[in-house]
């Protein structure tokens, strides 16, 4: 674990009786929460005091509630458990709303704890009051309010269970300032729970087995619910046992090592039509652990929407997701790891002997597009140079936190993740995500380097968290793609309104010097030849660093160019 824990070794002995706040903190610890992210606020001072000197829960002080929420999401993605963010009433809650939306769209469990105004004056236009039920309606899975100190443990357990259950997502729990400080005569924290395991059996099991045994060109589409050590191990075992090529869902490129012979690619916004056409030749799609969201399915084209032309087996623990947009031949509402465990026990079949050739065909398409062909640019460094350098320097054994930006296409194409590498991204693609999320990820790094890749626009949205990285001495390499533009919007402008650029040109600071002013190691690469040595120096640095890359706007993505006229 990176960074200094902000706890006290010998806190003063507490002589006051248990309060709702102490029960809340004890409940979080009982539910295996060991880290929270926050911007301190007077509306939840009793909770902060209950966290003082806590032997288990680490408190990470952030500079903005939105990026504190992003840090909690980065933490959740690395642990597979709920991320926790604390914010004060009113403005603090509205700042954190971006993380709530992101958690909802990405199906990531998040608990947002909001210090609320006193119960007696709520709704009476008091300072910084808000109706959080109305505000988060339609975004959060649930909005709860603590009204009885003795119900604290029960309410925290319910919030975590809702956030992590079914299709995961955000839960908002408001803590009125008069209630959270009240005595809790019960002082009963939440009890940890173990989810029930449901195994596929009977007719459903037989139907899946018949479909797999008959398939000559099956493909397995793996999603977020396999993003854990057991899921990744089982995925490789199934692919090898049954000779099945594996696709990964949006921003889960790392689920199978990218040089594995069964790896068939990553479905995302820039997946190319020729590759989609090839995988569409499948005669069976096993969608395991994915919601089959719109980006992954490329607007519900693969698998085809309501009427797929190949049998679809959809395995996801939330029955309400199955059949929502894609009609399955068999829907399996269980944990995907359990499903893969059963497939590992089935005898392998290869009707017609076509599977090896089918697997090799799809892997060959993916491997061929990952071969770097140097590109000459007149206006900066094509970002593929950065992706290739990261691949060579780390062999794909790193945690990459990606922000929103056209540079992601270069990473998806040329950075090959290894057995332990991780890609951390968020489906809603909010700018600035990577800056806060990298802090959360780096504190869970387990020895792997953490690299946050962010654009010039995204960095300045949340650059305050550079100070958090320094405060925690988190080993993060912030790679800043500086092309002087909101590149994604610029690309859309040129497609739809060629030659009419507006509101996308940026005037930027010297990012390397800005980083140095925060206390990071600040580096800059202005030529392709400088990229690898600058990245190597940053990766070797014992602390946070930033590498500014003067990036080509002409070579805006790995697949598209802006002409000289359009620039």
Image: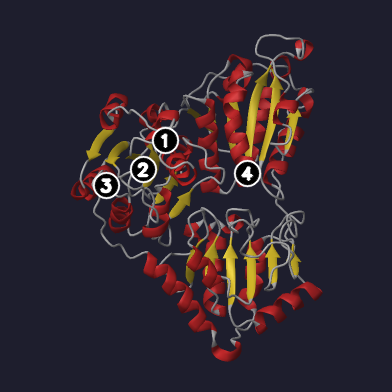
Residue 486 at x, y percent in the picture: 42, 36
Q: Residues within 10 Å of mark 4 (few under 14, many from 20)?
A: some
Q: Marks 3/4: CA distance?
A: 33 Å
Residue 398 at x, y percent in the picture: 38, 52
Residue 529 at x, y percent in the picture: 18, 50
Of discs 3 and 4, which sits in the foreground? 3
Q: Marks 1/2: CA distance?
A: 8 Å
- Res 462 visible: no
Q: Residues within 10 Å of mark 1 (few under 14, many from 20)?
A: some
Of discs 4 and 2, which sits in the foreground? 2
Residue 405 versus residue 421: which sits nearer the camera? 405
* Label pair 3/1, CB-CB below 8 angstroms: no
Of discs 3 and 2, which sits in the foreground? 2
Circle 2 is placed at which residue position? Answer: 566
Residue 192 versus residue 482: which sits nearer the camera? 482
The reply, left or right, for residue 53 in relation to residue 174 is left
Secondary element under disc 4, as helix, strand or loop, is helix
Residue 101 circle label: none
* Label pair 1/2, CB-CB below 8 angstroms: yes
Closer to the N terminus: mark 3 or mark 1?
A: 3
Circle 3 is placed at which residue position? Answer: 381
């Amino acid at each position: 674990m990176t960074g200094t824990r902000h706890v006290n070794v010998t806190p003063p002995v507490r002589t006051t009786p248990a309060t709702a706040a102490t029960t809340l903190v004890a409940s979080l610890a009982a539910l295996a929460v060991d880290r929270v992210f926050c911007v301190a606020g007077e509306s939840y001072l009793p909770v902060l005091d209950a966290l003082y000197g806590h032997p288990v829960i680490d408190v990470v002080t952030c500079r903005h509630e939105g990026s504190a929420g992003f840090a909690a999401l980065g933490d959740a993605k690395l642990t597979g458990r709920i991320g926790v963010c604390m914010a004060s009433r009113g403005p603090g809650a509205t700042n954190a709303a971006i993380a709530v939306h992101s958690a909802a769209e990405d199906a990531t469990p998040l608990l947002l704890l909001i210090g609320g105004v006193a119960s007696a004056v709520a709704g009476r236009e008091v300072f910084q009051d808000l109706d959080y039920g109305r505000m988060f309606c339609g975004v959060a899975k649930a909005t709860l309010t603590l009204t009885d100190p003795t119900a604290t443990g029960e309410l925290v357990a319910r919030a975590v269970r809702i956030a992590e259950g079914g299709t995961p997502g955000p839960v908002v729990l408001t803590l009125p300032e008069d209630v959270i400080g009240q005595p809790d005569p019960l002082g009963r924290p939440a009890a940890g729970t173990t989810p029930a395991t449901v195994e596929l059996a009977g007719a459903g099991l037989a139907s899946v087995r018949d479909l797999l045994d008959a398939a000559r060109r099956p493909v397995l589409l793996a999603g977020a619910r396999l993003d854990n050590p057991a899921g990744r191990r089982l995925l490789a075992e199934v692919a090898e046992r049954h000779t099945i090529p594996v696709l990964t869902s949006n921003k889960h490129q790392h689920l199978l090592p990218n040089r594995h012979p069964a790896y068939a690619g990553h479905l995302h916004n820039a997946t190319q039509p020729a590759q989609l056409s090839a995988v569409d030749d499948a005669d069976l799609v096993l969608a395991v652990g994915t919601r089959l969201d719109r980006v992954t399915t490329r607007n519900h084209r693969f698998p085809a929407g309501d009427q797929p032309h190949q049998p679809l087996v959809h395995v996801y623990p939330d029955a309400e997701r199955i059949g929502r947009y894609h009609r399955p031949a068999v829907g399996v509402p269980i944990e995907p790891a359990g499903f893969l465990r059963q497939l590992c026990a089935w005898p392998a079949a290869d009707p017609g002997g076509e599977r090896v050739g089918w697997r090799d065909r799809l892997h060959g398409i993916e491997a061929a597009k990952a071969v770097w062909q140097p590109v000459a640019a007149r206006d900066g460094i094509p970002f593929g140079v950065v992706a290739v350098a990261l691949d060579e320097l780390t062999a794909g054994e790193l945690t990459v936190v990606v922000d929103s930006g056209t540079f992601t296409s270069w990473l998806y194409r040329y950075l090959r993740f290894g057995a332990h590498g991780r890609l951390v991204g968020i489906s809603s693609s909010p700018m600035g995500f990577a800056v806060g999320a990298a802090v959360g990820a780096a504190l869970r790094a387990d020895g792997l380097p953490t690299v946050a890749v962010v654009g010039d626009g995204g960095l300045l949205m949340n650059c305050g968290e550079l100070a958090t990285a320094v405060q925690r001495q988190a080993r993060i390499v912030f790679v800043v793609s500086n092309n002087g533009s909101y590149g994604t919007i610029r690309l859309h402008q040129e497609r739809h309104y060629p030659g009419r650029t507006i509101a996308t040109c940026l005037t930027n600071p010297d990012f390397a010097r800005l980083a140095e002013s925060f206390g990071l190691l600040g580096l800059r690469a202005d030529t392709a030849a400088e990229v690898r040595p600058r990245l190597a120096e940053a990766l070797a640095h014992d602390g946070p660093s930033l590498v500014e890359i003067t990036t080509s706007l002409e070579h805006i993505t790995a697949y598209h160019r802006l002409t000289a006229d359009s620039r």
